[in-house]
Amino acid sequence: MAFACAALCAATAAHADGPAFPNGPIRFIVPATPGGTTDVLARVVAQHMTQSWGVPVMVENRAGAGGVIGASYVISTKPDGQTVLIAPSAFGVRSALDRKLPYDPLKDLAGVGLMARSPSFLVVSPALGVKSLADLAAYAKERPDGVSYGSAGMGSTGHLHAAQFAAVYGFDGVHVPYRGTPEAVTDVMQNRVQYAFAPGPNALPLARDGRLLVLGATSAAGAKFMAGVPVVRKPGMTGVDADDWFGALVPGKTPLAVREKLSAEIARILALPDVRTRLNEIGAQPESSTPEQFDAMLREYVATVRKLGDEMQIRLE
């Protein structure tokens, strides 16, 4: 809530002169397939922003290439705040590990603010016959060819989590990239791949229906959404929050006053009781920040994940 207050205060300092903002429809670009936390978060905020600002706020899904397609599109648009990237932490992971991106994520995009954090859940099919993290590790070690894990693509947060889990527990994991997390989770349910890390909207409803089994979460916050879920301990994540995060960015040359106005409005919406309740239902905790705070967080996150990727020899080509 402190971040939210900071964002609201920052907006009062925005310059009164300059072009009016917003000036027409706003588009939220989601670099992921529908149905995940990023998509749900974008649509909840867009609905409230439409009502309060009186302009259409539309959500467009531009998935592919681990978020690169969506980010590239936003970078190509006019830096006027009318096109906003709603990015998951997978954007930060890809920014850290992919040395051949067609853009500089820390220069060509500018932060608007943090929006939420969410633990990621390690899920397996009940048909796999394992009941714990140790069971899964033992199952994997018994198979010379290793086991497979799914994710939303090369360089996604789920890829990083799952690769770390295999490295820490000492077995060979074969990465199977998908277009999005929902597709990866579907194949986990069918036991076509043996495990995946998935955010709340993709994991919790299916677990409650008995179609998935949750073995662990990336932080103690997981127990808030599913009682008794243990934390997946992953050495090497010291200095970076292991949970997924979600934030808003705009083209790099967007005026700070516009970024501050967007940030303050998003913070106001995230503080609404019905919004907090809706996000908690899907396993996300609203959290806001100023544009400057988000920029600093992203720089630190990219640097830390890049170091971790080097240590784990994860290369994206």
Image (cartoon, rainbow, N blue to C red):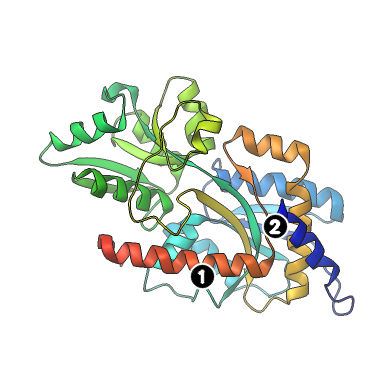
Task: Give the numbered dot on residue 113.
Answer: none
Circles 2 and 1: CB atoms closer than 8 Å: no
Q: Can residue 97 be seen in this view?
A: no
- Residue sitting farthest toward the left: 144
Q: What residue type is labelled 1?
A: Arg
Residue at point 69% right, 64% down? Answer: 290
Residue under pointer 2: 3
User: Element under label 1?
Assistant: helix
Residue designated by label 1:
299
Secondary structure beneath label 2: helix
Q: Where is residue 299 in the image (x, y as percent from the top left)?
A: 51, 70
Q: Badge 1 local density, few (<14 within 10 Å), some, or many (20+)?
A: some
Side (left or right) of 8 relative to 63: right
- Residue 267 visible in rendering: yes
Residue at image x 42%, y 72%?
101
Q: Which of 200 and 57 is in front in this view?
A: 200
Question: Which residue does the image show at 32% across and 37% down from the upper left?
Answer: 195
Taking the image as shown, residue 203 lies to the left or right of residue 148, namely right
Residue 239 picture quarter? bottom left
Q: Going from the N terminus, do you reach mark 2 or mark 1 first?
A: 2
Specify the amino acid type for callout 2.
Answer: Phe
Q: In this view, does 146 lie above or below 294?
A: above
